[in-house]
Every structure is written in structure tokens, then in C-alpha cells.
Image: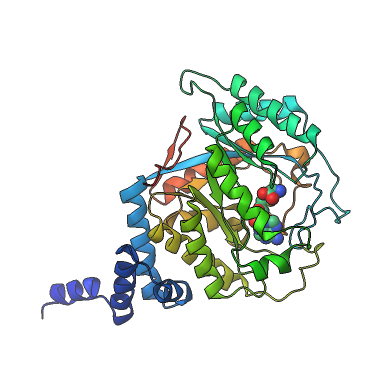
Amino acid sequence: MTTATVQFVRKTAVTAPGVEAQAMVARLQSGVPDRETLRRILATDLADEVEVIRQAAEQALLTHCGDTVRLRGLIEFSNRCTLDCYYCGIRRSNRAPTRYTLALDEIVETARWCGEQGYGSVVLQSGERRDEKFAAFVTEAVRAIKAATRSDALREGVGITLCVGEQSPETYAEWYEAGAHRYLLRMETSSPRLFAALHPAEQRYASRVDCLKTLKAIGYRVGTGVMIGLPGQTVDDLVDDLFFFRDIGADMIGMGPYIPHEQTPMHSASVRDVPARMTLALRMIAATRLLLPSINIAATTALQTLAPDGREQGLRYGANVIMPQATPLHVRREYTLYDGKPCLDDSAGQCAACLEGRITSVGRRILRDQWGDATRRV
Ligand code: SAH
């Protein structure tokens, strides 16, 4: 063999694990995904296999969604919360954060700024309140943002995603009428057993599922998701999560590694180490992309918390949505869901500048001045 031939063989040779991984991917894409294949995709840590899976997920993304990354400016407008989720830093019982709710004007101004950056969409996120005053405030904010962000590029104003938890069907309908058209409500886990271990008894698995169904029936584009690497979570639980995403008809998935917060009851529970949680989260993104190729999938801030290039890695494993931090700096530290949340001191402008470089570094481009919804599955 000539040197050139040897080099050619080296470059193209697919290793045995690689061949096996190609067969797994083919089974998954054949339309009849089986539990065992998904379990293997999530469980493998052979570098060759992971790379075959990653490339297949990236290819599925490019084929079904194109190379654009859709941005949603994240506005964490209130950390007031009536719930007590055992994992979350802004839970009711945590006395450490100073509680705040941004003034309407500041929320609208922030959304307007996001529109001017070309983000196309915003996410309004907060702790959970179910009182009438809160519902009316959100309605008002949605209407005002819509009115303030209409432009030649965005005739209907920025797209608005709400992420404010479980609410009554009437409240969901009111917000939809006001102009919010996407809703993000993570299931946190599709396992009823695990859900019960993560939440106080008054927070019910069934009511969360009901909320997702109600949101879909109203007409929202619905996002859901889970935390990955939770104490007591098995690979089988994660496979169930994937089937849950499919069966609920999710338009978007936002998921990331679980990261303990020191001031929560769960912080001392044992978890997989950081690299294990990180790679598992990336493989979950890839598996979701292969199973549901046309939906939107977020590369979340939690990924970036565990690795500085975590969101870029998420994009390379099949994600196509990023939520740049737009929360005003003066409250950002009070919205600490988990320890080590990044970008606490970077202004929204710095976040915007940094993001563009990160996205182009992985060969992708920003979708500007558009809502960036997923194409509907049939
Ligand atoms: N009250 C809203 C917003 C919650 S915060 C709601 O219930 O939808 C948004 C997400 O942050 C949660 O859905 C949860 O998945 C994630 N989160 C909270 N604490 C976390 C932690 N310790 N580690 C990783 N993600 C966490």
C-alpha cells in the first residue's frame, strides 16, 4: 500500500463501535424506535459511538430545520414563587434571594431591546404565582410587548414564550388571546415516582400533564423538558422522557443537566459527576433530535454552567435554540435557580456580542427578525 492509500484507509475506516452506532441510528430513524436502542444511545461512552450519534443528530437537524439558530431573549421578570420545588434556588422557603418583580416598563423596554437586536422572540420567565393580580400583570405585559415591538421586520411584534408554570385553563387562554403563542412548561421528569421525590405532595404529576394538554388544545406551541442527571434518575427514566416528548406532541424541548443549589433540600443528594451529567445531557439532545427531527431543541444555560462551551456543544449535538440572557443586571443575581449560573455580570449587550461568535464557531448562523417556530409535525 502507498502512504496515500494508508492515509485514506485510516481516515475512512469506521471502527466496530462506529458500525454498531450507525446501526443504532438507522434503527432509530426507521420510524419504529425501540427502547433498547435508545437506552444504548444514552448509555454509551465509547468515543467512536458518541461521535457517530452526534454526527447523525447534527445531520438530522440540518436536513429538517436548516443551519439557523433561533434566539429567545430571556427575561426573568420575577423571582417571587409560591411553590417549593426541592431542587430550585428560588423556591418559596429559600430566604436568601431578595424577592423582586420588574416594573412593566422595564419588562417592555427589555423586550424592545431584544427585538432591536434581531432576536425575534422573548421568553418571559418567573417563579410561580396563581393569583389574579399576577395573571392580569402578565396579560398586560404581553399586550404591551406586542405593541412596542412591531416593526417592518416583525409586523406582529416579537414572538412571546411564557414560562410561568401551572395555571388555570382560563388564564392560559387569556394570555394566548393577549398574544403569547408559545409556552414552556417542563415536566422535569416523566417518571411519576421521581416527580414525587422532587416536589412537595401538593404539586401533582397529573396536573402538570393536564396543563400541557390544555396548552396544546388552546393552540400554543408547547415546549417541555426534563432535568438530566437527577438523583435517583435511571437511563430507563430518560428513555421514558423521550417517549413522553413524542407522545405529548412537544413542539420544543428545553432540557439540561441538573445542578445542585446549596440552599435547597436536594443539594446533598448524590449525583453523577460533572462530565457524566454533561455528556448524558448532550446524548439526550442527540437522541431527541433523532427521534423528533423537526422540533426545536434548546441548548440551555445549564449546559454552559457545567462547561464554558456547553451551549456550543449542545448546538453540535442537534440543538437549534438559544435563550440569550436579557434580564436586567440589577436583579440577575436574585434569579439563581442553581449554583454557578453564568453571565451574572455581563450586560445583555455583552451577552449578545459573545453569542454571535459562539454560534458561528460551530458553523451555524443566527435567524434574525423571525419568531423561529418549529415546522408543525403531521
Ligand atoms: N416557575 C416556572 C419557571 C421555572 S425555572 C416553571 O415552573 O415553569 C425554569 C426551569 O429551571 C425549571 O423548569 C427547571 O427545569 C430548571 N431548574 C430549576 N432548578 C434547577 C436546578 N437545580 N438544576 C437545573 N435546572 C433547574
Q: Residue furthest right?
A: 95
Q: Quadrant of ligand 1?
A: bottom right
Q: Position of residue 153 (x, y in %)?
A: 46, 22
Indicate the quadrant where residue 340 lies: bottom right
Which residue is rendered at x = 45% and y = 33% of the image? 368
Which residue is rendered at x = 63% and y = 48% of the image? 211
Q: Is residue 360 left or right of residue 240?
A: left
Q: Is residue 92 left or right of residue 145?
A: right
Could you tell me which quadrant the N terminus lies in? bottom left
Which residue is rendered at x = 31% and y = 78% of the image? 20
Q: Is residue 21 above or below residue 298?
A: below
Q: How many marks?
A: 0
Q: Position of residue 242 (x, y in %)?
A: 49, 63
Res 104 seen here: yes
Res 340 seen here: no
Q: Is residue 118 above or below residue 318?
A: above
Q: Residue furthest left?
A: 1
Q: Position of residue 39 (x, y in %)?
A: 45, 74
52 and 244: which is toward the camera: 244
Q: Is residue 123 above or below residue 104?
A: below
178 and 306: which is toward the camera: 178
What colouring style does the render use?
Answer: rainbow
Indicate the quadrant where residue 38 lies: bottom left
Q: Is residue 46 left or right of residue 303?
A: left
Which residue is rendered at x = 32% and y = 63% of the image? 29
Q: Position of residue 214 (x, y in %)?
A: 59, 44
